[in-house]
Amino acid sequence: MISKRFLLPLVVVLAGAAAFAASGRNSSVPTTVTASIAQSGQVAGDSHESTADANDRLNDRTTALSKKDRVAVFEEVWKRISERYYDPSFNGVDWNSVRDRYRPRLDQVGEDNEFYALLNRMVGELHDAHTRLHTPRERIDRERFLAVTPGLSIWEVENKPVVISVDPSSEAARAGIVPGMIVTSVNGIPVANRLEQVKLAIGGSSTERAERLRLYRRLLDGDPGAKITLGLTDNTGKPLTAAVSLKSVSDAPDVSWRQLPFGYGYIRLTLWKSPIHDRFRAALDQFKTAPGVVIDLRDNPGGEVSEVLKIAGFFFSNHEPFGNFITRAGKHLELATAGGQNAAYTGRVAILINESSGSGSEMFAEVMQESGRAVVVGRQSCGCLLGISEFKKLKGGGELAVSELGYVSPHGHRVEGIGVIPDDTVGITLSDLQSKRDSILLEAETALRSSKAAAAVH
């Protein structure tokens, strides 16, 4: 097989199911940031967009699909996957049979959103977070770095649906919603029942974690301006009913940093999107003499592989292998950092991950861990690591992403369907949320002081 080393640039998108995990990018436990590059005006995009503007934008660039159009889009989606999917065995799925089962269902769908949901269920048969359909609204939001959010995120904690983060400037915060509250109902429907309803509208994904992420994201989904009424209980069991509006907010890539106790640096990265490496470099330069740095990739769904390699290069003086993409034909495309970083950071490194850390974040964490350059702390990641070469626009304004590249790490590990396993696993608890204690970060600081982290210096 022919091998080719890819240094920079390489335009391959690594954005997995974690992108559907949260309503807006909120960390699982809010942290106080004393310096943020986004605040300097270097991150493009307004923080809010009016519902009217969002609707006008959508109407200008999309059209309703006729019955004939739907058939054409269906066939295009099926054919493109058939011809381009990275795995010629389609993950063990009989792709011809899938077409035969879903094609008759086109006559049963009503509105276009139901049509896209049907396509996503069909594509979900592959159990691949990267191969997916976006509705016209989702496509435009992706292109403009927008997220539709009620200002809070929900995830399972101690087998309960729990508020894990709240935007302090949101309507949700003003309504009295705080992390650690248990969600009992959505729009008057018990959460268990609502989850069962939503489950019918989502397709399969790379892992059970990825499916649950998509499920909980859909629980709070809707158009900008819509209201969601939540039933909740606080840590004393006292009930609260709160109505919150969905808003379009900026989801642009962001880097923020602060100094931790014991002199360690803390850098949070939300998305691997060019030119975020410049901003990351500026943050890392603040900690040139720090004995260690924590890199927070929790809830970071991925992005561009070129940004992963550029940022990884800040931690290695020479070319560092970063694994291989594998094409459908079996050709290996070798990945590596650029090397030659005279000012590479040589201190200890800890990387924070959770189930919403996907794709590009998983590549970075896996290889930094394998190379002995970093200790990884947190919860097992999404397990969503494949390569997309482009988003294919479809008639009507939607789009299709198809996984065209598989990935294996330098040590031959396949992350897709598995995820990155932390060196130190730290669960999330109701007590942590209610007391605003970030146990993962605290454990990372401990790891930086340990012999394990000391051995990670490269």
Image (tube, rainbow, N blue to C red):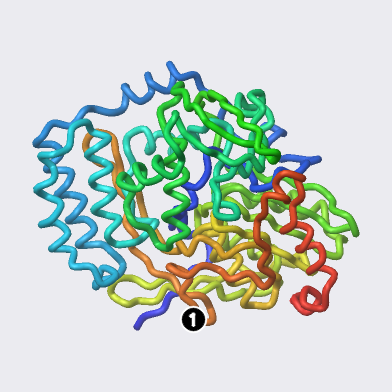
At which x and y percent is residue 288? 83, 59
Q: Quarter of the image holding residue 224?
A: top left
Q: What kind of residue is marked 1?
A: Gly
At which x and y percent is residue 47? 59, 28
Residue 368 against residue 243 in the figure, above or below:
below
**Horizontal side, residue 201 vs residue 180: left or right:** left
The residue sitting at 23% across, 27% down in the picture is: 63
At which x and y percent is residue 112? 23, 33
Q: Residues within 10 Å of mark 1 (few under 14, many from 20)?
A: few
| On-image quarter of the C terminus | bottom right
Residue 456 appears in the rendering: yes
Q: Nearer the viewer, residue 172 or 291?
A: 172
Residue 5 appears in the rendering: no
Q: Nearer the viewer, residue 42 or 411?
A: 411
**Horizontal side, residue 129 vs residue 174: left or right:** left
Secondary structure of the residue carrying numbered label 1: loop
The residue sitting at 63% across, 27% down in the picture is: 170
How many numbered discs?
1
Q: Quarter of the image holding residue 159?
A: bottom right
Q: Residue furthest top?
A: 52
At which x and y percent is residue 239? 61, 31
The residue sitting at 72% across, 58% down in the picture is: 440
**Horizontal side, residue 425 vs residue 417: left or right:** right
The residue sitting at 29% across, 62% down in the picture is: 126
Q: Nearer the viewer, residue 291 or 102?
A: 102
| On-image quarter of the N terminus | bottom left
**Horizontal side, residue 315 vs residue 193: left or right:** right
> Pointer 1: what residue?
412
Q: Quarter of the image holding residue 82?
A: bottom left
Q: Residue furthest front?
A: 237
